[in-house]
Image (tube, rainbow, N blue to C red):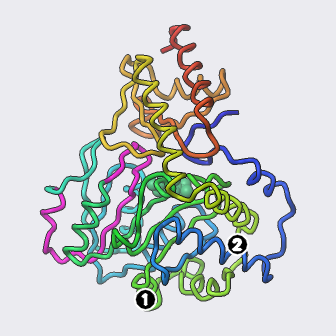
Amino acid sequence: MLNFTVGPVMMGEKVRAIGAEQVPYFRTPEFSKVMLENEDLVKKFAHAQDNARVCFITGSGTASMEAAVINLFDENDKVLVIDGGSFGHRFVEILRIYDIQHTVIKPEFGHGVTAGQLAQYDGKGYTGFLVNLDETSIGVLYDINLISEFCRKNDIFLLVDSISSFLCDPFDMEELGVQAMITGSQKALACPPGVSLIVLSEEAVKRVYSNSPKTMYLDLKLALKDGERGQTPFTCAVGILRQINERLKEIDAAGGVEREIERIGNLAGYFRDQIRKCDFPFEIISDSLPNAVTPLSPTNGVSAYDIFTVLKDEYRIWVCPNGGEFKDKVFRVGHIGALETRDYDVLLEALKDMCRRRFI
Ligand SMILES: *Cc1c(COP(=O)(O)O)cnc(C)c1O
């Protein structure tokens, strides 16, 4: 099997081997050590301040999106949210469900947000800003420097869903003044799905302690308190957290986050060059590409979903289909996980074969 989706992705050998082991009991000094190491390495890779904290949630990325919103904002906030695809839309839904005042910014399809779009919200009393840095559903990477500047100028609390951009695109939490960021285990961390995490600045930690969200499982006060000693309030996904530990240490040993970003960027570059060179009937639909994924749209009327199905059923290769209105228009090729350039050669060969067979 060759998996080019954006999660779950291909896992490295050592991470997989841990998955085959028995899951140990976790209220132990040994597991606490694993968790404290995880916290330190995540902070290091996010370029968070020393006094930042990390909450590990057993639940996929969306659990952390919901936890972050309800622990960091309340009914007195007025937030801006970018809705450029299905993940942006998810933030909007969460804000709606919890009755948090918000204004939606809708970028043009395939584009990021512009300075002009943000300028109209200057000085309007907004207190929060929510963005999915890489809107994975359509492969658009927003300009985080622009957003960060806007938030600084307006003294706005910035929450970033970096679920698919963490370890993929440059990100310096401290320098950008990001107060909270989210990621998940099944994207560039290349572990099984089931764990997500929230990095909180000192200011964000204070907000959590002064807020009273109506939730028990997702109340981050408990996670912060127990996390001080490397523990979690409830039984966590122990096995996945051990796999995350292995993966974080591997990245560290191989040269750290910058090296990993470069590796993923090189894979994306290799694939995109080949796509252009081979003259496939696809176009790249985003003008602000993230490193994690390449969104492609067939230009000859062939259904994107059929391309996904044929690759899966006849070549045992997974690319990422889109849902809803983009089902037939867009498919995506990911660059995260344990992949190498020769894996892309296999995919490109399959696509060429599909051209020869006049399928595409
Ligand atoms: C994958 C992803 C999520 C989380 O989705 P889950 O299915 O809950 O893990 C959220 N935001 C972005 C930008 C993502 O890429």
- With 148 as the anchor, is 349 left or right in this view? right
Viewer-proximal residue among 101 and 300: 300
Residue located 38% across and 55% down the image: 89
Q: Which quarter of the figure has residue 308? A: top right
From the viewer's perspective, is residue 279 above or below residue 183?
above
> For mark 1, what is the residue?
206
- Check residue 119 for magenta coloring: yes
From the viewer's perspective, is residue 155 above or below residue 264?
below
Residue located 61% across and 33% down the image: 318
For marks 2 and 1, give the CA distance: 24 Å
Give the residue furthest to the right: 22
State the extent of the magenta-drawn residues as a range: 117-142
- With 25 as the anchor, is 173 left or right in this view? left
The residue under label 2 is which amino acid type? Cys
The local crowd at label 2, few if under 14, some if 14 to 19, many if 20 or more residues have their Cα within 10 Å, is some
Residue 262 x/y as whole percent: 49, 47
Residue 126 x/y as whole percent: 22, 75
> For mark 2, what is the residue?
236
Residue located 43% across and 88% down the image: 206
- The circle on residue 98 is none
* SS assignment at label 2: loop
